[in-house]
Amino acid sequence: MSIAPDTTVVLGHRFATELPEIALRWQAESAPDPRLLVLNESLAAELGLDPAWLRGPDGIGLLVGTRLPADAEPVAQGYAGHQFGGWVPRLGDGRALLLGELIDTDERLRDLHLKGSGRTPFARGGDGLAAVGPMLREYLISEAMHALGIPTTRALSVVATGRPVQRETLLGGAVLARIATSHLRVGSFQYVRTAGDLALLRRLADHAISRHCPGAAETENPYLALLDSVVAVQANLIAQWMLAGFVHGVMNTDNMTISGETIDYGPCAFMDAFDPKTVFSSIDSFGRYAYGNQPAIAAWNLTRLAEALLALISDDQDRAVELATESLQRFAPLYSAAWSAGMRRKLGLGNEVDDTVAQQLVDELLGMLESERVDYTSFFRGLASGEIDPPFEVWAARWRSLDPDSEAMQRANPVYIPRNHLVEEALAAAATGDMEPFHRLLAVISSPYDERTGYERYAEPAPENFGRCFQTFCGT
Ligand code: AMP
Ligand code: MG
């Protein structure tokens, strides 16, 4: 690792300093022939980084982790997790590094993190690498989520490394630079809890409170307030996923953040036809992480977080369980409230419409969408402009009688999402060196609510021969 001559980038090392027990000092592997494939210029500006500098050799060196400011302390983070329900006491960043923290233009702390930067001591059997396709995929989908207003980690760049990566075939390697308000996960707490060091657990919780819910520190029981806060942000997040038709695909506890940001875009995808059983991931054989299961899985994961926090919540075990249970019980009503409010927005219903009426209308609609196998996203957008399929006429007459606000609906229902066939098309072209379809799709999904002429095919569902059997792969 050489030292970048530019000293304007200041990388903090708060996580590494405050939590050295779960921060393993490590360095990125060299990239033999780094080539910047995509740079998020607006995000760079938000982070106070000069896009022109990032495009130069020192900038690219930062984005692959080989040229860091002199005082940087890159680390692989330790965490545990339940993967598909099975306990794994030691996961950690096997192919990722936290380079450090940046202070953005709003004075907020943001993690600069790399994925695909080489093997770490947490790599187990993995090669520590990532291929170009999956990293571009994470870039596209996380930026689409951001543009839809859904809390998410962000993608700053993808750099092709020039290092081959062996998957089913030999692929080009890449490093994704990811920005997050932190990389603390439910699995971080599980890891520390299992180590049995209560002082460390308290330090981790204090770190999380300071970064994500500073108000909790002022309450009577800060660690209970931390749990309350994670329950609330996750209830909101999962409601937003459900409203957008997003299937995360691998909701293991190591992939659930304390911040409430969506993280780890592996086998995720947007649902086409509305169907709660929708699963894309090739390894999710039992449908554990199906679209319709996501709220229940989130509650299950939060229960694992609560268990990890119990010893901090009260010295009296029974009292701790009682308090944590009350906190967890708030997930369902918070989720329902966020989801119902979102459905009202999607249907353009004002506050004067009675809750029961709205709820019944939504339930009936979802039942029909499922039985008619209607494309979820385009149905709602079409409704906003008065396009109604014949089977929905009777329902629509009742809906219209509630005087829906079609302009509000255009702001709540996207025209463009990263549809699976479009993403695949963009990635296939990128694999041959043609980045044009990727950039065109990125431009479209970055303004999802603004309908543009000439982009009709980006709003259309997948052709019949594509949609039904589409699978995503975890071997990213
Ligand atoms: P994920 O399914 O991406 O959340 O990853 C689960 C765990 O596997 C994490 O500990 C990752 O760091 C690790 N992992 C995934 N892919 C690789 C790889 N190619 N090399 C090393 N570790 C990996
Ligand atoms: Mg993960």
Image (tube, grey):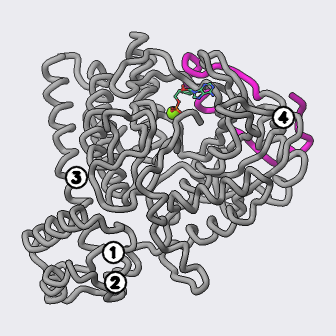
- Residue 64 appears at what percent x and percent y? 77, 39
Tell me the element at label 4. loop
Quadrant of residue 249 within the rendered picture:
top left
Q: What amino acid is found at the position of numbered circle 4 in the picture? A: Ala
Above or below, 317 relative to 118: above
**Image region (quadrant) for ligand 1:** top right
What residue lies at 64% left-to-right and 59% top-to-bottom?
Answer: 105
The first of marks 3 and 1 along the sequence is 3
- If you read the primary sequence from the N terminus, does the residue marked by circle 4 or circle 3 appear first? 4
Secondary structure beneath label 3? helix
Residue at 69% in and 65% down: 437
Residue drawn at the location 72% of the way across and 48% of the way down: 158
Task: Find out whether residue 98 is within the magenta segment.
Answer: no
Location of the N terminus (image quadrant): top right
Disc 1 + disc 2, Cβ < 8 Å: yes
Of callouts 2 and 4, the N-terminal one: 4
Which residue matches tag 1?
380
**The magenta segment:** 1-28
Discs 1/4, front: 1
The answer to which quarter of the image holds residue 47 is: bottom right
Quick check: can you spot residue 263? no
Q: Nearer the viewer, mark 2 or mark 3?
A: 2
Q: Is residue 21 left or right of residue 350?
A: right
Which residue was labeled with disc 4? 31
Mark 2 or 3 closer to N-term? 3
Q: Residue 377: give x, y in percent of width and height.
A: 38, 69
Q: CA separation, marks 1 and 2?
A: 6 Å
Q: Which mark is residue 384?
A: 2
Residue 354, above or below 403: above
Query: Which residue position is annotated with label 3?
Result: 334
Q: Residue at 58% of width from left, 68% of height from top?
A: 446
